[in-house]
Image (cartoon, rainbow, N blue to C red):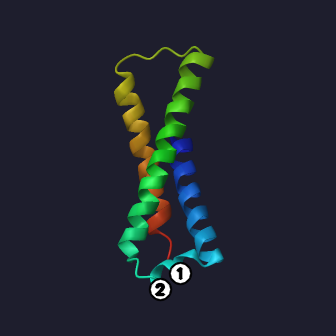
Amino acid sequence: MSFIFFFGTLSSSVSLVWDKKQGTVERAQVSGVRTWEMLLAQLLTEFLLVTAQTVMAFTVLVVGYDTEVRGSVFLAIAILVIGGVMGNAHGIFNMKI
């Protein structure tokens, strides 16, 4: 779980820093894009990335390492995705745009 949270934090922070370094944020703001729209786009993109990473990591854990899952697989993946989204929120909202 901590890996998923850390990856979400790192991924969102690095992408925001990269966008700011290349001037994408300023160009978007000059063209009329609001800050909340940029944050929403960032969150949706990172959500898809974290979801894909979680499903792949869970598949490797269950199939590759032959780990027995007791309970709902859906709920286990949902908890990991929520942890990743919280990492994304931590990475995004602790940055100054």
Crowding near the residue tagged with mark 2, few <14, some 14–19, many ≥20 C-alpha atoms within 10 Å: few
Residue sitting at x 37%, y 69% = 37
Q: Nearer the viewer, residue 17 or 22?
A: 22
The answer to which image quadrant residue 57 occupies is top right
Please say whether residue 17 is visible from this viewpoint.
Answer: yes
Secondary structure state at the residue bearing disc 2:
helix
Q: Are marks 1 and 2 in contact (CB under 8 Å)?
A: yes
- Residue 75: image quadrant is top left
SS under mark 1 = helix
- Relative height, residue 77 to residue 19 (above, below): above
Q: Residue furthest front?
A: 31
Residue type highlighted by circle 1: Arg
Residue 24 x/y as whole percent:
57, 75
Question: Left or right: where does residue 71 sit relative to residue 84?
Answer: left
Tag shown at residue 93? none
From this view, report whether residue 76 is shown above or below residue 23.
above
Identify whether 26 is placed above or below 52.
below
Q: Which mark is residue 27?
A: 1
Q: Mark 1, residues whose alpha carbon is within 10 Å: few (<14), some, or many (≥20)?
A: few
Camera sees residue 97: no
Q: Which residue is mark 2?
A: 30
Q: Residue furthest bottom?
A: 30
Left or right of 70? Residue 67 is right
